[in-house]
Amino acid sequence: MTEARYLTVISPGMPATDGAGVQLTRMVGTPQLDTIDPFLMLDRIDSDDPDSYIAGFPNHPHRGFETVTIMLEGLMRHRDSVGNDGLLRPGDVQWMTAGRGIIHSELPEMIDGRLKGFQLWVNLPAEKKMMAPSYQDIPANQISTASFEGGAARVIAGAFEGIEGPAQPQIPIRLMDVRLDAGTVWTIAPAAENDLFMCVYEGSVQAPGSEGQLHDVPAPGVAVFGGEGIVTVTAGAEGAEILYCEGQPIREPVEKHGPFVMNTREELQQAVDDFNAGKLAVG
């Protein structure tokens, strides 16, 4: 009998505000669903009200992890202390390694008033937290799609069905934007040592719990899987769109304070002190 993973958590996320008043839904990084090693946070923006997001995310620092911005609709202007300046368009991805420190801004630019997308935070292991910052600008036309019966997956990082994602994360990650037609049964085999979750952002899926009973996961919702083996989900009557996040756990202590993620309280305090002294993104 083939081993299968099963649902352990279904979480709808919670309303949150970040940056200069941007309204979003925090899917991971909440009191109900904190971290899913190595993933620290997932924010979802989906709005046709410019007043809820147009002020964006003015200059702010990061240290100790990677941020992944996935644009689905609208535009996002990026500028940072390393000298990068780019415009993310629908379908584009930005993979930024903050490392020892970076200061950047993310400011929306409207297309017909719509803004839709995600920002995912990926932890770095201790030996990489103080590495030099870097930036990967990945246009939509560099992201290949793996098609299968009843659906398709844009492969951003890692590999699926012979397609390699263009992103180069610092730890083993598989990140995909998956579309399933109504009623499609989709099966995927995660790496045995990896943890994973799926963020259902349109439609719904069903997945089995530990006793084999099926549970509904409607959008917006996060499904976390435990156990070992394959994962199987079935799309609902309206189909489903899913952000699939799989990664190798780091299994190290995590100390967080706003935009800083380190291993110890002392390292966290040093990040705050470096930022206040203007040293965070220098050298």
Image: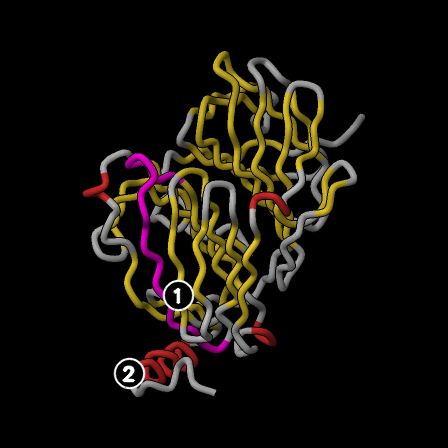
**Crowd tier of the residue under label 1, counting other residues whose Cα lies within 10 Å: few below 14, some 14–19, many 20 or above:** some
The disc, 1 or 2, on the residue closer to the chain's N-terminal end is 1
Would residue 113 be counted in the magenta stretch?
yes
Residue under label 1:
79
Q: Quadrant of the N terminus?
A: top right
Helix, strand or loop at label 2? It is: helix
Which stretch did the figure color magenta?
100-116
The structure residue drawn at horizontal position 67% and vertical position 56%, both measured from the top left corner, is 172
The residue singled out by tag 2 in the image is: 276
Quarter location, residue 152? top right
Q: Quadrant of residue 107?
A: bottom left
Q: Is residue 159 left or right of residue 234?
A: right
Q: Amino acid at mark 2?
A: Asn
Q: Is residue 10 left or right of residue 124?
A: left
x and y, in percent, of residue 244 in the image = 57, 39
Q: In front: 239, or 30?
A: 239
Q: Nearer the viewer, residue 88 or 165?
A: 88
Image colouring: secondary structure
